[in-house]
Image: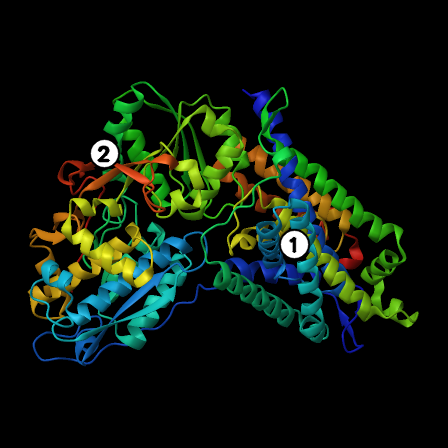
Amino acid sequence: MVNWGNLISQMFNGLVLGALLALISSGLTIIYGTLGVLNLAHGAMFMLGGYAGYVAYTYTDSFIIAIIFGSLFVMLVGIVMERIIIRHFYGRPDEDQLLVTFGIGMCIVELVRLGFGSLSLTVPAPKMLAGITSLGFMFYPTYRLALVGIIAVALLALFLVLYRTRLGMIVRAGIEDSVMVASLGINVYRVFMIVFGIGAMAAGFAGIVNAPVVSLTPDMGEAILVQTFVVVVIGGVGSFPGAIIGGLIAGEIISITSMINPGYAYVMLFAAMTLVLVLRPHGLMGSQSRA
Amino acid sequence: MVKRLTGDQEFKAAVSRRTLLQAGAGLVGGSLLPVGFAMPAFAADHPPIGTWPAGSSGDTVYIGAAVPRTGTYAVQGEDELKGAQLAVEHLNEGNDLIKQLAPKIKKGVLGKQVKLVVADSAAKPNEAVQAEQRFITENKVVLMTGSTSSAVAVALNKLAQREKVLYISQISGSNDTTGKDCVRYGFRQCFFGQTAAAAIAPVLVKEFGKNKKVAYMTPDYTYGHTVTKSMQDMTAAAGWTTVTNQVSPLGAPDYSSYLLNVANSGADLLINVNWGHDAVLSIQQAKQFGVLDKMKLVVPYQIPFLARETGGLMEGVYAATEYWWTIEDKYPHAKMFNDAFEKKFGYKPEWGAENAYISIVHWARMVEETGSYYPPDIIKTWEKGETIPSLMGDVHYRPEDHQCVRPVIIVKGKLKKDMKNKEDWYDIVEIVPGEGLMQKPDAFGCKLGDYT
């Protein structure tokens, strides 16, 4: 017998979970789609955004400043990382790219642990968004409700940059055929750097806006990275809309399965990924050319 | 396939799905490789076994510790490691506390200096086994220790029995560690699911009454399942029923879906069996979802640092624990340990540290009593089950399952206004003697295995 109230609650919660996954995944997929580098430091970037925001919040007591600082700091780290290390790996085998980004991720995690320790830290939700809201069919944390709006705005901004600007046009062209873009006289390396920065910023932004929902630990990016990876595979590698669709599907799978049998929530997520890989190897929104 | 530009202006085929799958395989499967094992040299009186006699033929003996220094249990692993470091330091210097706990020890164990070699297990069984296997090969360790996850403890139990090297688990709450997965070469000092449940259940029934509806949150491995089962069994007589059991993977990044189910379950109490950072996060999110306003929280297997990490959320919450520093008023050994630990590390020891310290000292005492590092003889000394001192009174190990019979402490989170200092998080409700809490030695299917 289906408990409809619980089902609606879980579906709504899945939307919130999915929105966050979509935002983080979009950064990963943009970087992969354009640069061809699967950034395994993406989870560390997510974590770093949370910690950078925490520092800013501690000094200013302002959540807005924490968001701005956390995002820009991680963008800067991303750009520096791309300039100093990643760019040397564009021509290297995929395995090297995986290893170097995985290594960078470990270094970031351990540096944060060195500076802040392993004890978890908390960033409180802004006062106006604290507490619980009644939605009629359920009570839900107010900040999580706001989070949907915040992430929607962020994804819209990313969409506008990608689909309504010259830079976005170059990025999308680069995803399809970066050689042709270069042969048109466009400095693709500068674009690569910017794209890496934007991708990192998406993760950093997600890290700080998610901070009031979770408690910060240096290892928090690890589990998220795995989920993000699943989202990108489901949605389609390199596809921005795919990241959003994949994120929402992943959120719903986790939430709805947990209602039926919580022990299988994450199992079903991987089962869904397997199913997609079998039936549609390039992902739901991925084009054949990227597969 | 599409051609894409690479850094040195060369073309290179994109292998996107394969790359992703490689990444996934790398993430989830990284360290499953078995490691070889070298046999030690022969000695005169017994045939060599495990790392004996090679491991104790010099001036120094090694203890291999595999503790989580990263991941969900990292905080607790560090605390455990500090306890082990202090124990080794005290053994080597013949500290006054050691003289009281193991009078035969002078400086070092059987006159040999003890050194600790340490690896990060990340609370993963395969990484712990790899590390200990390396310590056996390279350092000829005479003792393995560390866990902070029963999955690790069970895996190291099996390694100990296979390699015939002694192992003392550290934090491990599963009934299986000295139950169906017990081994001749493994010993456990700390309390566990059965004793935690038997100790806290009467206190809970007295506080909250009979016929309560309970929601459980359970981590999905041996620790979680056995602790939840023990709590269900121990409260069944009082008419407590389980309305939902939310099983989640270790290190889940979010608990909202589980908490919605808990919120909608109509439970009177939430018994949270999650541990480490999982406990911190699930309790914080339970507060965000209003669950803690609807039902009372209980933590049957208390997590070191939980009160500190959750801020005020443990106020009024009942928990069962192994050790809380304020028992020093009652136990002089605890006072000596607390003072030494705080002097060295700058905070009050939590139970991970206490457990590591006393477990290693108990091992050292057994070696001294045996007068040899020959493992089968040490085990036989241990199996005499003699009453020996601990940091909180006398205890003994059961020969049938190698479990220490020791007290369990029931604590209740203090209100902030009642805290006398920044680490005064709990009131001690009761110190329950261990003897009455134990199951029959064969109740959980323990079969110890061979000595040689």
Res B330 quadrant in image = top left
> Where residue B279 appears, x then y in whole percent?
43, 42
Please indicate, yes or no, whether residue B323 appears anywhere in the rendered image.
Answer: no
Q: Residue at x 29, y 19 (%)?
A: B210
Q: Residue at x 14, y 69 (%)?
A: B94
> Where residue B195 appears, x then y in whole percent?
23, 39
| Quarter of the image where the N terminus of chain A is located | top right
Number of disc labels: 2
Compute the Cα span from label 2 to label 1.
47 Å
Give neighbour class at mark 2: few <14, some 14-19, many 20+ (Cα, 10 Å).
Answer: many
Q: Secondary structure at mark 1?
A: helix
* Left or right of residue A166: residue B52: left
- In the image, B98 versus B435, the foreground residue is B98
Looking at the rendered image, the disc whose residue lies closer to the viewer, 2 or 1, is 1
Residue placed under numbered mark 2 in the picture: B198
Q: Tell me which amino acid carries mark 2.
A: Ala
The relative height of residue B43 versus residue A81 in the rendered view (above or below) is: below
Q: Residue at x 46, y 64 (%)?
A: B31
Please indicate, yes or no, whether residue B344 appears anywhere in the rendered image.
Answer: yes
> Where residue B105 appears, x then y in whole percent?
10, 67
Q: Residue at x 74, y 46 (%)?
A: A154
Kindly identify which chain the residue marked by label 1 belongs to.
A
The relative height of residue A2 versus residue A121 in the rendered view (above or below) is: above
Kindly identify which chain the residue marked by label 2 belongs to.
B
Label at residue B297: none
- In the image, A157 versus B9, the foreground residue is A157
Residue placed under numbered mark 1 in the picture: A70
- Asked whether the beta carbons under mark 2 and mark 1 sit within 8 Å of each other, the answer is no
* Left or right of residue B234: residue A76: right
* Left or right of residue B51: residue A96: right
| Quarter of the image where the C terminus of chain A is located | bottom right
Q: Tell me which amino acid carries mark 1.
A: Gly
